[in-house]
Structures are given as C-alpha cells and as structure tokens.
Image (spheres, helix red, strand yellow):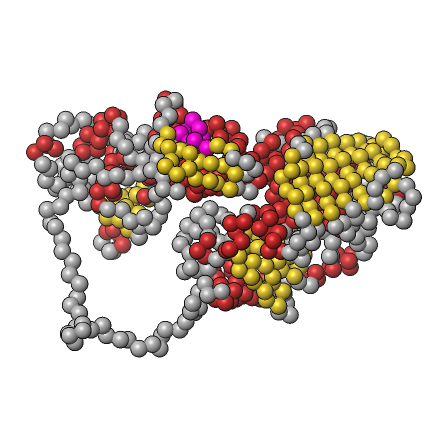
Amino acid sequence: MIDIIQLLPDSVANQIAAGEVIQRPASVVKELVENSLDAGATEIVVHVKDAGKTLVQISDNGCGMSPTDARMAFERHATSKISSANDLFCIRTMGFRGEALASIAAIADVELRTKRTEDEVGTLIRVIGSEVKAQEATACNNGTSFMIKNLFFNVPARRKFLKANSTELKNIIWEIQRIALPNPDIKISLFHNNSPLYDLPKTNHRKRIVDLFGKSLNQSLVLVDEKTSLVNIHGYIGQPKYARKTIGEQFFFVNGRFMRHPYFHKAVMQAYQQLLTPDAFPSYFLFLEIEPGDIDINVHPTKTEIKFENESSIWPIIHAAVRESLGKHNVVPSIDFDQSGSIDIPIRHKSGESVPFPQIQINKDYNPFNSGRTPDLRGSTSTKSDKRNLNRWEDLYRGTQLILKPEDQQQPIEEDASFFPSGEQFSGKKTLQLKQKYILTPVKSGLMVIDQKRAHERILFEKFMEVLRSDSVATQQQLFPQTLELNPADSSLLLSILPELTSLGFDIREFGKDTFIINGTPGVLDVSSPELIVEKLLEEYKHSPVDARSKAREQIAISLAKASALDYGTDLKPAEIDHLIDNLFACATPNFSPDGKKVLSIISLADFEKSFNK
Ligand code: ADP
Ligand code: MG
C-alpha cells in the first residue's frame, strides 16, 4: 500500500491559517494598524471602501522595511519582533506571531509600498493569493502603505459570510476605537468611502476618550490612578449619575492591548455596587500596565482574552482603585462607613412623646378587577380583539370565590380558555407586586408568577407587529424635538434601520454628522425621553442574534419592545397590574416574551405542600 500523508503546499496552509486570523475586513484593519504601531508610527491613515470589502488601505510614517524585509514579511512565521521562545515572555509589541501578512496575502490582492528613511528608493511588492506577482523599486514616502483589495476572493464561502456593510463597518470602527484609546499620542484617521469618520489628533487619554465617544462624556469622567508593585492602573471611570441605561463604553487594556476580562469587569461593577440601579451601566476605560512576563497573551490568535498570573491579587487592586476614585470625587460620601457601633437614637415627638407606630388602613371593599377604570399603562390601549379576549379573561374567574357585580355575571361565558397556560383558572382576582419585578396572583392550581417586564415586552411587541402589518402608522409628534448625538458606529446602525423605525411610527431625521433629531415617536408608546429609547433600542438591536437580523422588521420590533417596556423597579398600582394582566392575556402568545423567554410560571399547590413537608 502506498503512503497517503502529504505535506500541504504553503499556499493551502496559509489559506487555512488565514481563517483563524482574518475573519472579516475589520481583522485586516486591526492587524495592519497594529503593525504600524509596532513600526513606531506617529501617524496612521486608514481608508476603507464598502466597509473594507472592496479596499482597505493603511499608510503609516513608521520605520519602513528594506527590500529583503519587505519580501520576507509575507512568509509565515516571519517576524522582526521575537527571535527565541524566551522572548515570548516579554512581549511589548502588538504582533509577534508573524502570521498576519502571510494570512492576508493568502486570501487577497495585496500591494505594499515601503521605504526606510535611510534608503534612496522604496520597494513595491504585489502578492495575490500567496503568489508574488511583482517586486520592484519605487519612489514613495518614508514609512509603509498597504493596499488590500478583493478580500476572500479565493474563499467564496467566507466572502458570502460577510455581513451587511453597516455591520462590517461597525466592526472596523470598534477595532479603531480599541487601538486609538490606549494610543492617544498617535494621530489616527479613518475614512469610509472617502468621507472622514474619525480624525483623531495627538492628545491625552481623557481627550482621546472624548474625541471618540462624544463631549457629553467629559463631565462624567473621573480619574483612576493606582500604582502597585504588581500592576499600575490608570484611566477614567464614569460617575454613577451619568451611567447609561444601555451597556456603556467599557474597556480594559493591558500593556496597550484591548482585552476582555469578565472577572476584572466584576471588580469594577462591584465597586459601583449600591451606587447604581441594577439596569444602569457605568462607562470605564482602564489601562493596566504589568510586567509582560506576568501575562500570557498567547491564548488565541485574535488575542482579546489574556491570562494573568496573579488574577486574584489584581482583582482587589482594581476594585479598590475604582472605589477610591469614586470616593475621592465625592461620588460616595462615606465609603464602607462602619455603622455597626453607632448609637440607636430613638425618634421622639417635639412634645417628648414617642411617635406612634404607623397604621395601615385597608379598604376591604376595594376590588381592582371591577371594570370602569382603565389605568393609563404605557402602550396598553385596548383594541377590539382585547375586548373579545377580556370576556374570556373574566371567564377564567368562573367558579372562584370572587363575588362578581351583577353586570359582570351577565357577561357571555365562552368555554374555550385554551389561551391560558394549561387551561389554568384563577381562584381569585387578587394580585400583588413583588420586589417591583414580579406580579403574583393565585390561580386554581397554585400561584402564578408573571415577570412584569417580559409581559409588557410581549404586549408591546404584538402591538408593534400589528402596526407593521396594517401599515397604519400613528406618530406622536414631540412638542420639543430631541437631539441625539451618537458615535459613528451607532450612527451608521441607526441609519441602516431608519426605514423600519419610520414604519413603526418614529420620525427621526439626520441632522449633520452623527446627529439626529427625533420629531416623533410611535403612537402606541408613551415616551418621556425618546433619545433614551432610541439609544436602548440600538443597544438591544446590536446584541440581538445576528442571524435573526434577516427578519429585520421583526427583530427591530423585538428590540423596541425590550427598549420601551416598563423596567423592573417600576412600582405598579393595583389598577395598572390589572390592566397589564388583561393586556397580556389578550396577546396571541402570552406565555413567552418576544425573544422566547418565559413570561410566567406557576408554583403548584403540590410544591407548597412539599415545602411544608405535607
Ligand atoms: P508580526 O506583526 O506578528 O511580526 P506580521 O505578519 O504582522 O507579523 O508582520 C510581519 C513583519 O513585517 C513584522 O514583524 C514587521 O517586521 C514587518 N512589518 C509589517 N508591517 C509593517 C509596517 N507597517 N512597518 C514596518 N514593518 C512592518
Ligand atoms: Mg502583525
């Protein structure tokens, strides 16, 4: 039998490896800009066309390459940054694997122009699909310029996988943000289809953050600066009062490299504990400096996860540094103030008598389920079909202890209660709100628990879908149009879903660069701060599953429902609870939220019995 194992030709090996390093145009931008940083550039210009699908061009004023190095740079494992295994433990550069250029050249058409200051002429090299097509001397500026065209030309499957331009562009913007933040002393500009998205001058950390994320952040930023023998932490955190309802800008960097670190993230979040409502997110930009030998950046080719030798010792340092900064800036007046030894002062009337214990008075005749009052719950205008279902809803109380008013008893009774979970019936129209989060109501088989936010999401979602289906858009014009300033990523996302938002009833106009005016909001919503709803909507939409976006209209309706539903922590009056339940069961699918989460659950009588060992 003949041997069957063969070594793959370099071009194939490169193409396979490329898949790991280069997943999308944004990966090309990241790798090339990082190379420019490593080359000591102080100015980097990035041009992309069609979100990088047609062209990525990156020019720098770095050290440039000799003709031989320029040719070598495209070989796999060719790097000027490390030369022995030991060097792996003291990496100070962004790159070190010598994989990026070989990978990019395997799957694209690459043109490189480069010149060192000491050379008379520069070098031009063209490589297409790992094949060197040309190498010649050329007149060019000092530094290096790469032009990448036709990305994934020979990997059609991957090209097909690329997302809409708005999504790919957003990824490029994210990469630029992650590189620009820790390098404020480098001038960086980004152009898309020749129009400038960022033009970031050389500056300091604080100004760079503001240049990237908008002036409104400036007043919120508080300095963090902590030096220890293990780690130095520098950066800015947002004051709690400016925390956003959407996941704000949260960035960790270690030795100038962006990283994700859920464990350290917790250290920051815990420092904010009790200063934030559970649905608010603080911004933070923290730059850690640590001995390169204490971290392992070799975990993954795309290198955003980083292992720390002393993770558990660094955690409390981050926590304390953030806490201290919040304290120093009078954000927390008495951090961890120990009250255990304080004296209990009895409260007394001026006359010297003790204050009587507060009395609670109950109107025993009050029945929140009696008709005649329709509380104004956001987005819960009744429709014909609601009324039909409400009749059935009343029917659910049949056979319960509740005493109905005579007119209620005359309601026609339908037998079908199939919309109700497992044919459940209520044993009494009593409701209770628990922790401003759940609504409890007894049903025949036990206790029904309704998640108030998810229930409202379901109600709103069905209303939005009805608006979309019927094309009968109702817009509520704003008395005072609101201005919305977004970062370029969010701005391009908003533009891409604007038609859908219009058919839902929004009236949003573009007003200059990354600025929008909200003139009107959907009629079914009672919106007090439209700009917040739009921001939350964008955040929800960003985090929705990517494949769900093919059904864009539905996904936007889901995102809007989630963004505008009443939040946990909202106190509901009995009448509002009543109305919420009514509207929920008027829905076609009351049991699940629009993104498929459970809206209600029933704790059975048997469960109660079990808990009492009966
Ligand atoms: P790595 O960055 O891991 O070393 P790359 O494939 O990204 O690997 O780059 C290979 C080599 O090409 C680098 O080590 C560097 O010597 C050279 N190089 C790449 N880009 C530039 C640039 N913009 N300026 C100067 N040299 C560069
Ligand atoms: Mg590199």
Considering depth in this image, is 13 or 357 the residue closer to the camera? 357
Where residue 319 sits in the image (x, y, percent)? Answer: 52, 63
In front: 606, or 273?
273
Among all residues in the image, which is located at the extreme right?
120
Task: Name the residue located 69 percent from the left edge and 54 percent from the top edge.
Answer: 185
Q: Which quadrant would residue 164 be assigned to in this image? A: top right
The answer to whether residue 482 shows anywhere in this view is: yes
Position in image of residue 372 (x %, y %): 15, 36
Q: Nearer the viewer, residue 445 or 363?
A: 363
The C terminus sits in image quarter? bottom left
Q: Find out whether residue 538 is within the magenta segment.
A: no
Q: Residue at x 73, y 45 (%)?
A: 44
Quadrant position of the N terminus in the picture: top right
In the depicted structure, whether residue 308 falls above or below residue 535: below
Identified at 44% across, 65% down, the residue is 332
Residue 81 appears left or right of 412: right
Residue located farthest toward the front when viewing the structure as drawn: 480
* Region of the chain picked out in magenta, as a range: 501-508
| Residue appearing at x 74%, y 50% in the figure | 42
Q: Position of residue 259 (x, y in %)?
A: 61, 52
Q: Position of residue 388 (x, y in %)?
A: 22, 26
Q: Is residue 160 left or right of residue 113?
A: left
Residue 502 part of the magenta segment: yes
Number of on-image labels: 0
Q: Is residue 37 left or right of residue 522?
A: right
Question: Would you identify the image quadrant in which residue 398 lies?
Answer: top left
Q: Quadrant of residue 390?
A: top left
Answer yes or no: is residue 547 visible. Answer: no
- From the viewer's perspective, is residue 249 above or below residue 520? below
